[in-house]
Image (cartoon, helix red, strand yellow):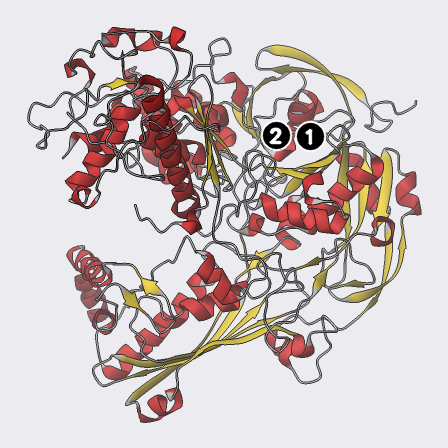
Amino acid sequence: MNDTTGLGDDVQLITLDVNGSPYEVITAPRRTLVDVLRHDLRLTGTHVGCEHGICGACTVLVDGLPVRACLMFAAQAEGARITTVESLADSRTGELSDLQRAFTAHHGLQCGFCTPGFLMLAQGFLAERPEAAKEEIREVVAANLCRCTGYQTIVEAIDACATARRSQRPVGAEEDSCD
Amino acid sequence: MTPAKDDRLVGRSVARREDPRLLSGRGRFVDDIELPGMLHAQFVRSTVAHGTITGIDLTRVRQVPGVVAAFTAADLELGDITARLARPLSEFVPTAMPVLARDRVRYVGEPVAVVIARDPYLAEDGLEAAKVTYAPLPPITCEEQALAPGAPRVHAEAAGNTLVDVGLFATEGIDEIFDRAPCVVHVDVRTGRQNALPLETRGAVAQWDAREEQLVLHTCTQTPHQVRTVASRCLRLDERAVRVIVPDMGGGFGLKCVVGREEIATAAAALRLGRPVKWIEDRKDALSASFLAREQHYTARAAFDTDGRILGLDADVVCDMGAYSCYPFTAGIEPLMASAEMPGVYKVPAYRVRGRAITTNKAPTAPYRGVSRPSYVMAMERLMERAARELRLAPVEIRRRNVITDFPYTGVNNITYDPGSYLESLDLCERAVREAGWYDRQAEATAEGRHIGIGYSCFSERTGYGSAAFAQRKMEVVPGFDLAEVRMDTSGAVTVTTGTVSHGQSHETTMAQIVADTLALDLAKVKLHQGDTDRITYGWGTFASRSIAVGGSAVRLAAGKLGDKLRAIAAAEWGIPRRTPNWTGAGSVGATTRMSHSPTSTWPAPPTSHPICCPRTSSRASPPPPSSTSTTTAPSPMPPTGWWWSCTRAPGRWKSSPTSASRTAVSPSIRRWWRGSAGAASHRASRGRSSSRSPTTPRASRRPPASWTTRCPPHRRSRRW
């Protein structure tokens, strides 16, 4: 077979469910999930920091659980529900989610490169552990690396979001006063 | 508190304007850029620390499916990257860093060839097929080897493997001071190599724009204009034929304020192939073969009197800068920084320092966050600690006796220190430690035979270096100044362009705050452009915390000049009475005085004689509440300042909106600039300085300027703000 894709001869057609939309991708078996998301599907919100599972910038949810997309082949994600940072804001209005608003209210980002990974980590974790205490959040946040901000504000953002969700009041409401 | 102060955006926490896109995955970082027909580059890198290249065989590389091309130094014929200091050869030896190694490799990871393929995976396949043979040379891996008599040279031109050897300061008679001093302490300390490690690795996307006859180089750099200069020299293009664009950047920390060879090679490949080429640094390469920092060795002694006061400081600083001088700062960046700053927060009456940069067979170095500061502070603090023990003084006490207390203070290092609260901070720190019970716990532990250490360390950080500091280093290219351009369009929106580049510092918000305050605009009406060499003539980028101090000052001055032009236009166009605006000359900022601090709802009705009267609009989430307690004390000759005038020259568009309910209906033009200008003046008044500013005569008869664009290099001005 002639290589017409630039991917080598050994290509396969896989189907991915990303943010609720089905995608058909012709890809090489060795291609990682993050590269397919970023460069084939052009969902560039997910970032690549270390390429070996340390920094967590590439964290996405696979069937609801945080996964390092640089350590998973795209083909392995076939049949799973993949959720990326692009899913968080309202796709129609662009309105940020409560978690995203908490990050901005608590200054949980500077350059923003690691942020999608932290958001997806928190999104997956809070869905699983809505009752999470701040110390648990701190433990989970230790999974990812941030080089600018430090982790305190990230922990606070996630904790504020969790607290607000528990009391079902809008996140960011209490932050208005800090403007 | 004056209401004017309340009203200012600078100094307030405002929502970061970058956040929505960064939080929703809509940022655009270098690796997010995808161009039609784009190819991907990776580098064949040296596997030996030191050696002569005896052969490069890329035949099999070119046969790898998907590989489009592979180039060596001989194929690309690029100019070298050479950073220089204007110092004699005895002090500085310039060394060339080739874009790709030619005949010699000097560190593991040095790029030897570039492989271009249709896909990054295939490019890496290509790397594996490369065959490079070396005749190994003895590697120089540490200071002792580098400085050993008869050591092999990393660069033939650098005798003793020394690139920089400068004695910036030598107080006369310092040896006698040490001879006579009752207490002399010594330290010999080292810091290990560090890597700035921005989470986003380095990267570039290069493309030849045939229509503009210009190379467009997207790269994550803190200094785009420096990249332009180097690219144009290496590629032998005019500078105008190179456009460097910096998209969103995932951190830099100094590592990205030097020019790398890979982005130049990427550009060369794009030119050669006539197709866009992307290079994204592999993390493995970022760890091993990027620019590192801070491998330093301090041999220092300090003389003290019996009261513990420093009499003299004598230091020898050796910085292992690795294989090459970084552009533009050179291998002098660390030793010269350490030499200039080592006295730090202490009153040091006599000082001698020798700063050396040596070259070794390790990855080159670049500035990294504070450059030498952590290292020289450690050396200084060790000296203080040793002296405290010798003299049986408490560690805090000896520091208390030596920190600078009288400001402004010009040190033996020729640095004038702005007022600081060193002593107060030290006292506060000790009190906090004491109140937290640490001294009690230490005593208890000592009684039990355990040890709890309590340590103090003092430093001040010099930031926002002006040209003078770089001139002292004798850099061939002298950074320090910066440019800003503030432009209002016919819709009344303002575009600010700076030569600084945000890589996480949120300049889109902070620079806009400055302009919004200066011109009294809504924040939403101010848009920042940065990191594009075609948008601003020149700039020095972002490093050493210079962006707001230098770049922001330029922005403020430029915005002030635009404000003056707007006033002149308004005066000329609508015959606003002379006494109406109370302004000062060009460059002044917010020169009018406020009539009232009250919020919109309390402004008096608009004067009917004015063609346009609209309430101010505000994008702020919570406008300051009406205050009944604060009133202006000085009667102002101004008309109601709650009203603003638009400066577009289409009178038909003016609308009158007497109530605040119509905020969204007004023509989008100048926002609140009367009011905000007044705010600034009132703020100054509150600080007791306004009386020193005498308003000048309004230039009512002056024609509106042809151009509404203002450029203002701040180094030409000394106005403080």
- Chain to which the residue tagged by mark 2 belongs: A
Q: Residue at x 51, y 29 (%)?
A: A116
Q: Quadrant of the N terminus of chain B?
A: top left
Between residues B556 and B247, which one lies in front from this camera angle?
B556
**Chain that bears disc 1:** A
Q: Which residue in the protein does label 2 denote?
A: A69
Instruction: Report if the CB atoms under discs 2 and 1 are less than 8 Å apart.
Output: yes
Q: Amino acid at mark 1?
A: Thr
Which residue is depicted at the point 68% across and 13% down? A23
Query: Observer-nearest residue: A33 or B146?
Result: B146
Q: Nearer the viewer, residue A76 or B225?
A: B225
Give amino acid for label 2: Ala
Res. A136 visible in picture? no
Residue count near mark 2 (Cα–Cα under 10 Å), binned few <14, some 14–19, many ≥20: many
* N-terminal-most mark, 2 or 1: 1
**What label does residue A32 carry, if any?**
1
